Image: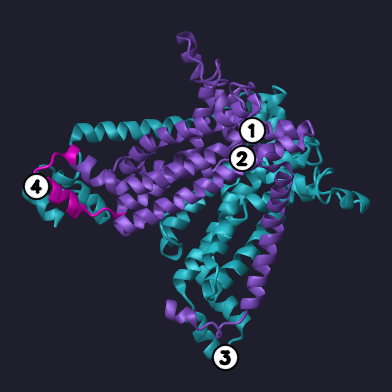
Chain colours: A purple, B cyan
Amino acid sequence: MSLVSQRNSILPGFGLTLGYTLLYLGAIVLLPLAALVLRASSLGLSGIWQIAMEPRTFAALRTSFSLALAAAGINVVFGGIVAWVLSRYEFPGRRLLDAAVDLPFALPTAVAGIALAAIYAPNGWIGVWLAPLGWKIAYTPLGIVVALVFIGLPFIVRTVQPVIAELNLDLEEASATLGATRYQTLSRVILPTLTPALLTGFALAFARGVGEYGSVIFVAGNLPYVSEIAPLLIIVKLEEFNYAGATAIATVMLGASFFILLAINLIQAWSRRRLGYV
Amino acid sequence: MSETLADWAEARPVTIEGRTKAHVKTRSPVTGEGPVLAGVLIAIAVIFLLLFLVLPLAVVFYEAFAKGVGAYFSALSTPDARSAIWLTLTVAAIAVPLNILFGLAAAWAIAKFRFPGKSFLITLIDLPFSVSPVVAGLIYVLLFGAQGLLGPWLKAHDIEIIFAVPGIVLATVFVTFPFVARELIALMEDQGTGDEEVALSLGATGFTAFLRVTLPNIKWALLYGVLLCNARAMGEFGAVSVVSGHIRGKTNTMPLHVEILYNEYNVAAAFAVASLLALLALVTLVLKTVLESRFGDELPGKSRRH
């Protein structure tokens, strides 16, 4: 394939299509992002730092990052089990549930948000059973975690599933014939092979969770210092015409997503080196 | 090989006929968990999926009809709801074709030619997926807003972008930017340039080759990308929320209308509008599943992320 595509000259339209691609990319993505960078650079690193360290902003950033981390962690465990079960077992409804895994990608976030609120509010479908026990999920940080678990689930499952499908069953058989228990095979043979995919899925879910807005604000309660997420604070700052504040928070979040993107690429490079696939 | 192992062990006979070999293989006792652990794992997975995916969907439709069918349809036919539905359709009708055109151009340039910086370009195309929707809205406010870089110029020329439909379209284009392109790039890179070269050598023009050879080759992947792009375009909330200004009947899309109704404690009406969006999500999922099962060979790679 590489040999064929090296012969550049045969197919027409390179200049036109690449030109259009760059123009469109520049106009829609790069120019507006440059506007943010320009605003941020006028604040300077120390200015951004100062704003990020204001108690309310810091609390919002901490809420967004720590809860996204927690939700991604929960998703690694349960998403991992879901991926395993959907790939390895046959049971009634499996195909339906498999298709449903993509629901969080397809369902608008605002719809997910009000649905989760209707479930976990103190008078909601599940909330009403938890209220007598003194448990509150909606309108607490726990509600944010629930929303982020919902949003992040497909990232883990869809990243891990193809790797499970590619697993070499001979290795499992060899492990079993060499006297390993199933638990040993799972933890020493299968889990290490799945680790890069689990990490990639974790990073993707984390990145999505940090920036998530629509599904969260309806179940969060949005109490400053407690359950106010960073994206919401950007909107609050914008409504106060505090452009510097909004820019600073956005810059921190953008920096974080670049960092996560880099981490994902490193994980994949590491996985390719170690295992020969992504 | 594992089938013979299973026959040999004969603990559980392999009875699933016509399944893919992976499923048959897993029934072999040494490469599966014991019945207890298997049952527990399946139970955990099923309960988790029911709780986190199926229940929210059921809630949307239940709550939508909680006040009866009459209330449902009257919630959908208020002028504000109608204009929100209309605006959502309009925005998607502009944003999706723009991204199709871009996706086709980008995939042609990237998949059919070699040039330096290609992988960097692909990273840039994927960039909007890693930006928070709220930040996506913010960057347009910083560029086109009243206090933005181009704000004074736009005001002098009486052009409204922020708190108007153009801003909503721009924000939607941004968040749905990579959907079509990434499907097409991945598939067309696999397909190479052989088919088009044959067409050209038989005397077709470049455009004819694209229309009659490339397009039929990529039609299902294109449809797949469009499906995902459209679902996100109609459902986008965060980015649109920042640039829309929430002007009722004017710059309110369906997701924003859901929020307004919900915050006014008009819960049944909010869920009625939300149920339309949930229906869209269901249709998207069904079509997506059909495409994957029937035309999986004509879609790029297995690992999908959004």
Image coordinates of residue A148 in percent, x first then y, are 51, 34
Chain letter for mark 1, please. A
User: Where is mark 1, residue-wise?
Assistant: A52
**In the drawing, does residue A152 fall left or right of residue B6?**
right
Crowdedness of circle 3 by 10 Å Cα count: few (<14), some, many (20+)? few
Tell me the magenta residue range.
A166-184
Amino acid type at mark 1: Ala
Q: Are marks 4 and 1 on the same chain?
A: yes
Image coordinates of residue A169 in percent, x first then y, are 21, 53
Front tag of 2 and 4: 2
Front tag of 4 and 1: 1
Q: Are marks 1 and 3 in contact (CB under 8 Å)?
A: no
Q: Are marks 2 and 1 in contact (CB under 8 Å)?
A: yes
Element under disc 3? loop
Amino acid type at mark 3: Gly
Residue A12, numbered circle: none
Q: Are marks 1 and 3 on the same chain?
A: no
- Is residue B158 among the parts visible in the rendering? yes
User: Where is mark 3, residue-wise?
Assistant: B203
Front tag of 3 and 2: 2
Image coordinates of residue A33 in percent, x first then y, are 68, 51
Q: Are marks 2 and 1 on the same chain?
A: yes
Q: Are marks 2 and 4 in contact (CB under 8 Å)?
A: no
Q: Are marks 2 and 4 on the same chain?
A: yes
Cα distance between the residues tagged 3 and 2: 55 Å
